[in-house]
Structure formats: structure tokens, C-alpha cells
Image: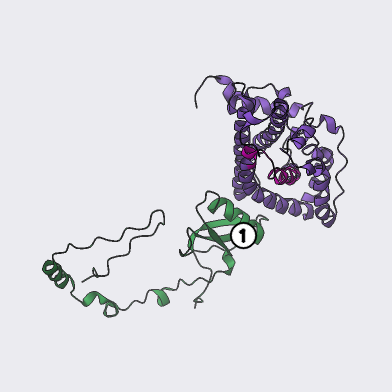
Chain colours: A purple, B green
């Protein structure tokens, strides 16, 4: 077990930094993207629910960016890492490059993301790096509700006569990128050797697909396609993300030295 | 004659024709042993989403340890004044006729103790302090 980043070998530290960046950017980008629903969600109660889940994700991102700042120790704090990078330096999964789209696309993406993220978090609860394990334990308690709520919505939209075509369209558009969240990182081997991720981490994507099968079969939905270009799962960001980046950096861009 | 039990003015009729849902009433418990208290309501299409929304609106900030969610249509309402607000004088049923104030004051003077203050409500429980039992109306 390791309790401080300074005890890690430099190569392990770099590998850990990449894992933290991937997870933090995932949470940060989906949090900002889904917060676009605030005020315009289909029902008042759901507006509160979606906005608060988006906020949860930003909270998770903050905790992960803080840990990342401790690990890289390059003088940047969590805010600097979160906001002061050009769009191409973000390391989120391609699934999150899609715009929020209509309600069916937002729900479909969140369902796919939250189930994949849960698989990742569950595996990381066995990490040898104690600070990560502690953050993951807290995040997992909040993610339970996210998965529960998104499963409810996903099943509902798959069964509704008006909503089912929209859900199928959304699966067409974003389904191929669903597997990008759990696509192996370049640093996977180093992470596994240091015990920062358990040995089964490499098989998470397959396990996650298997776990979704009963739901997809019950709802008579087409299986998720194989992920194209998994080695570029976190590269080549979209115009839609560049727009979102412009939005979420606009206030900080007014005065980078301002104290909030 | 109007029925004694009806969904009257306080409980508007369910709106199930707009496709969004119907009202559900949410009761919450702040700590173990407390009574369940009415928190408010949510609009939801079914019991599952009603529970999710109740969690979101009445439980996500650690303000509750337990929620009950009840379909408003399943609540029986009684607001008939003949049954609840009988018009005749019932003051003889209340203890207000006993003149306790002077006796209590005299007893306190003998024992040298101050008049007890109203009990403090427990922090955050939202409970009003109950009146001191010795302070009945005269």
C-alpha cells in the first residue's frame, strides 16, 4: 500500500497521473455538458435531479484534479489543470465528445457512461494507492444513485412509443463510442504492475459489456458495436467539445488571476 | 349532502392527462426515533421516479435518514367542519377552568424556585416547543 505520491517511482507516477487525468476529465466534461439541461429539462423534478448529478460529477472531478495536482507537483492547482488547457490537451473519452443532444441522447450517454464509470470505480476500490482508494470510496456512494436513476430513465425511454425511436437514434450515434470510457490507457501495464489498478482492470471493458447484456436483451435493443480506433479513444476531440470548452473556460478566461 | 371524505380544496385532483405525472407526498425523518414529518410533494409518473425525485428534493443534502413517499390519491382527506370543528361550546372538556396560576405561583414562592422556561426545541428539528404543562389557559 502507498500513501504518498512521493513514494512512487517516477514511471508509476506518470502512469497514475494519466489515469487520474482520464477520470477527472471524463467527470468534468460530462458534468459541464449535462449542466446544459439546467432550466430546460423535461420536468421540474428532473431538472433538479439532472443538475444535481451534473454538480456531483464536477465535485468528483475537483477531488480527482486535486489528487492529480499532488501527483504531478508541477505548480498547477486543480483549477489550473481543469481550466487552463487548450481543448486538444483534454483526455476525456470520445463518448463525451458528443453534444448533449436531445433528452434521449443525454440519458443514453449517461447510462452508458455511469455504468462504465461504476465498473472502473469498483475495480479501483482495490487500488494500492490509498489516496485514490479513499476518493473512490466517496465517489462510489454518489454514483450508486446515478446508475439507479439512469437505469430507470433508460428503460423508460426504451419502452415509450414516442421515446424509443429517439433512444435508438441516440444508440446509433453514440453507441460505437460507448467502449471508449474503458478502453485501455497507454499506461495500463505500469499501473497494473504497481498495483494501482487490479489485474482485472484490462478486462473491464469486456466485463462491462457482459453486464449490460441482460438489460439490452430485455429491452430488445441492438448490442453495442465494437469500439472503432480504441487506441485513439481519448484523442481527436470534436467541434462540439471545442464549443463546450469555450463555454466552460469563458468566465475564468476573463481574469485568470482572480480569486474566487 | 357532500360526502364527509373527499379530495377537497386542499388536495387538488390528480392531473394524469398531461403525461407528466401525479402528485406524491413526501415524509421525512431527520434522525432515528423522530416522527416522520411531512416535507412536501413531488410530481412523478410512477412510484419509482417519485422515490428518485423525493431523494433529490428532500434527501440529497443529508437532511433525512428515511423518506416515505405516498401517492396523494391514496391519502384519505377529512376536512368536514361538522366533524372537526363542532360549533357548540366545548370549553368544559378542556382543563382551562382550573385556576392553577395563583397556586403555582404560591408553590414556587414557598420553594424559592423560578418559573421554568419553555423547553428548547432540539436543534434543526423544526419542532415548536410544547407549552409548559403548568401554563394552561385560565
Q: Which residues are magenta?
A: A111-133
A242 displayed left or right of B105: right
- Numbered label tally: 1
Please report the residue visible at 58 percent of the width from the left and 64 percent of the height from the top: B70
A177 displayed left or right of A5: right
Examine the rendered structure and indicate whether residue B53 appears above or below residue A136. Answer: below
In the image shown, does A215 or A73 lie closer to the viewer? A73
Residue A157, percent from left and from top: 75, 51
Tell me if I can see residue B46 in this picture: no
A63 displayed left or right of A209: left
Tell me if I can see residue A17 in this picture: yes
Residue A5, percent from left and from top: 63, 31
Examine the rendered structure and indicate whether residue B2 appears above or below residue A238. Answer: below
Question: Circle 1 marks a residue in which chain?
Answer: B
In magenta segment, residue A81: no
| Predominant SS of the magenta segment | helix
Residue at the extreme bottom = B92
In the image shown, does A76 or A172 lie closer to the viewer? A76
> What residue is disc 1 on?
B22
Q: Which of the 4 quarters of the picture holds residue A242? A: top right
Please report the residue visible at 81 percent of the width from the left and 47 percent of the height from the top: A207
Label 1 crowd (10 A; few <14 / some 14-19 / many >=20): many
Residue B1, percent from left and from top: 49, 78
In magenta segment, residue A120: yes
Please report the residue visible at 41 percent of the width from the left and 57 percent of the height from the top: B125
Residue B22, percent from left and from top: 61, 59
The quarter of the picture where the C terminus of chain B appears is bottom left
Q: Which of the 4 quarters of the picture holds residue A37? A: top right
Element under disc 1: strand
Amino acid at each position: 500500500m502507498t500513501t504518498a505520491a512521493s513514494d512512487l517511482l517516477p514511471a508509476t507516477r506518470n502512469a497514475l497521473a494519466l489515469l487520474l487525468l482520464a477520470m477527472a476529465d471524463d467527470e468534468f466534461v460530462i458534468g459541464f455538458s449535462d449542466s446544459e439541461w439546467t432550466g430546460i429539462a423535461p420536468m421540474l423534478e428532473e431538472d433538479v435531479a439532472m443538475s444535481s448529478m451534473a454538480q456531483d460529477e464536477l465535485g468528483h472531478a475537483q477531488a480527482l484534479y486535486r489528487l492529480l495536482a499532488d501527483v504531478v507537483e508541477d505548480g498547477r492547482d486543480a483549477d489550473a489543470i481543469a481550466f487552463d488547457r487548450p481543448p486538444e490537451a483534454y483526455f476525456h473519452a470520445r463518448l463525451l465528445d458528443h453534444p448533449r443532444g436531445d433528452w434521449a441522447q443525454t440519458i443514453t450517454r449517461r447510462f452508458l457512461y455511469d455504468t462504465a464509470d461504476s465498473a472502473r470505480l469498483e475495480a479501483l476500490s482495490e487500488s494500492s494507492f490509498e489516496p485514490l482508494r479513499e476518493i473512490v470510496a466517496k465517489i462510489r456512494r454518489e454514483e450508486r444513485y446515478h446508475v439507479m436513476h439512469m437505469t430507470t430513465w433508460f428503460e423508460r425511454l426504451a419502452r415509450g412509443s414516442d421515446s424509443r425511436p429517439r433512444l435508438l437514434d441516440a444508440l446509433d450515434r453514440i453507441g460505437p463510442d460507448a467502449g471508449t470510457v474503458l478502453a485501455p490507457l497507454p499506461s495500463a501495464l505500469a499501473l497494473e504492475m504497481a498495483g494501482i489498478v487490479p489485474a482485472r482492470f484490462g478486462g473491464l471493458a469486456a466485463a462491462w459489456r457482459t453486464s449490460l447484456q441482460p438489460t439490452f436483451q430485455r429491452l430488445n435493443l441492438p448490442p453495442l458495436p465494437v469500439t472503432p480506433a480504441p487506441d485513439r479513444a481519448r484523442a481527436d476531440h470534436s467541434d462540439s467539445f471545442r464549443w463546450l470548452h469555450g463555454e466552460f473556460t469563458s468566465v475564468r478566461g476573463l481574469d485568470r488571476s482572480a480569486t474566487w | 349532502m357532500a360526502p364527509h371524505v373527499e379530495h377537497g380544496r386542499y388536495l387538488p385532483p390528480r392531473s394524469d392527462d398531461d403525461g407528466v405525472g401525479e402528485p406524491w407526498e413526501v415524509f421525512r425523518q431527520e434522525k432515528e426515533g423522530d416522527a416522520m414529518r411531512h416535507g412536501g410533494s413531488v410530481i412523478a409518473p410512477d412510484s419509482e421516479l417519485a422515490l428518485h425525485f423525493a431523494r433529490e428534493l428532500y434527501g440529497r443534502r443529508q437532511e433525512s435518514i428515511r423518506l416515505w413517499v405516498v401517492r396523494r390519491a391514496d391519502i384519505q382527506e377529512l376536512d368536514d367542519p361538522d366533524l372537526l370543528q363542532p360549533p357548540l361550546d366545548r370549553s368544559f372538556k378542556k382543563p382551562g377552568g382550573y385556576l392553577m396560576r395563583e397556586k403555582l405561583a404560591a408553590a414556587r414562592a414557598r420553594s424559592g424556585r423560578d418559573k421554568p422556561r419553555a423547553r428548547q426545541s432540539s436543534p434543526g428539528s423544526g419542532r415548536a416547543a410544547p407549552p409548559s404543562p403548568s401554563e394552561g389557559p385560565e
